[in-house]
Image: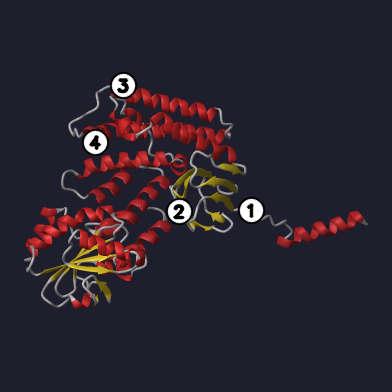
Amino acid sequence: MKKLFLLALSLVVLSSCGGKEEVKVKDYLVISGKVDNFRKRKIEITNGYDFDEKISFDRKSKTFLDTLRKITPGHYTLKIGRRIVPIYLSSIEDLELMVDAKKRTVDPTFKGKNAAINTFLGEREKKKNILLGDVRKLYSLNEDEFLSKMDEFKSSLEDLADASNLPADYLAKEKRNTHYQFAVAIKNYQNFHRAVYGDDEFEVSKNFPLDIPNKISFDLPEDYTFSRWYRILIKRRLDDAANIKRGEDGDFDLAFLETVNEKVNNSLVKNHLLYTNVNERITRADDLNEYYAKYMAFSTDENDRKKIQTLYNKLKLTAKGNLSPKFNDIENFKGGTTSLDDLIGKGKYIYIDVWATWCGFCKKEIPLLKRLEQQYHDKNIEFVSLSVDKPANKKKWKQIIEDREMGGLQLFAGKVQEDFQFTQDYLIKGLPRFILIDPDGKIVTANAPFPSQGDELVTMFDELGI
């Protein structure tokens, strides 16, 4: 009887899916933990391959928990306020950690199948900091001292990895990761040494091992997804090649796409490099149509192509000659509100600076913008500074305007660029951004030269009769 019952039960299980047992494969991981001395509401996962996530933090229980899907195994960064915790995530292995957000001398503790790897990453970071120390001091060393320091760094981290009881597959990839970090430092040396001493003429000797970074293949997809240092290295090499290709006055963005297409053969690496570059740069493309056409000719990833096509279709709406998107009833520093329609039709071009108080590059443009406004005072152009700060930054916004005696129209959106319709319409991702509109409200350029690009901007104004 007992055997018959077990047989019947097994038939029920097998019949659930056409006579075969349905096995549900886990396709996610759960990350959780407890954090002491942390008062913010979000913890961030960044610096991985195609994955960024903000996790809610429960301040009452001091815990967090989230389910992560579509994770590519590799190194990531857990940002807990100012506490940075390097972590390794696989595609399905859960990870639990305990960490103090303020006591950085207290190491995080980990639970889960990958606990040994994550403990190793913390030890690796400490050893790296001890060995390399301050970046300026490192790159101020002469060639022999620098190379000796980097050899010690590489061998010490390899020894640490060997002694850390790591899985064999991970250990092999981690040793390559260390080599890539070593190679990035070698590649950086000449430019960083120049910056430290202010000597633009400095060149490394013929014996300096520049062949180390230059010998590394562009076509290593497993390392590309695993190692941030590998991604950094090949991107910099491709940047250098693109700068040579474009010449003195050529278009870098177009040259970069052509360089990737010529030098990278692996489809995963090539498509990702093309997509990440275009996704970031398309809003600033000098020739939108040519840039888009080249990307579509080179990329073979249909999902990426659809995403870029969506961006392109939206950007066409802000092409030269189209009516500009509008902003309405924005708070004016001098009182009341201002809409774009209030400025159109008065015989003046409108030069809009989209900025924010937290943006260092934006604030560097302020003195040059002031000088430009003084130069074109009473001319047929209106200077508008449009802040995309949060409401909480209004006091800071007003203080900067007063302290720096900023002129022109000063407007406060009270929304960040991702939430403000005007900046959404222009697909503004990075700040500052300058836009030039003609007296009839039509777009002259959605990517006007910065005040710091003095000659280029003045030439444009001259050609327009400003």
Q: Position of residue 450 (x, y in %)?
A: 18, 56
Report the front residue among 260 and 141.
Answer: 141
* Label 1 to label 2: alpha-carbon separation: 24 Å
Between marks 1 and 2 in the image, the one whose residue lies nearer the viewer: 2
Q: Earlier in the sequence, mark 1 or mark 2?
A: 1
Q: Amino acid at mark 2?
A: Asp
User: Mark 4 sits on what residue?
Assistant: 195
- Write down the quadrant of residue 136 in the picture: top left
Disc 3 marks a residue whose amino acid type is: Asp
Q: What's the distance in space between the residues labelled 3 and 1, CA to CA?
A: 53 Å
Q: Circle 3 sits in a helix, a strand or a loop, which is it? A: helix
* Residue 422 percent coordinates (x, y): 29, 70
Mark 2 vs mark 4: give the one in front: 4
- The tag on residue 25 is 1
Question: Going from the N terminus, do you reach mark 3 or mark 2 first?
Answer: 2
The disc, 1 or 4, on the residue closer to the chain's N-terminal end is 1
Q: Which residue is mark 2?
A: 52
Marks 4 and 1: in contact by CB < 8 Å?
no
Q: Secondary structure at mark 1?
A: loop
Which one is nearer the viewer's eye here, 317 or 375? 375
Residue placed under numbered mark 3 in the picture: 144
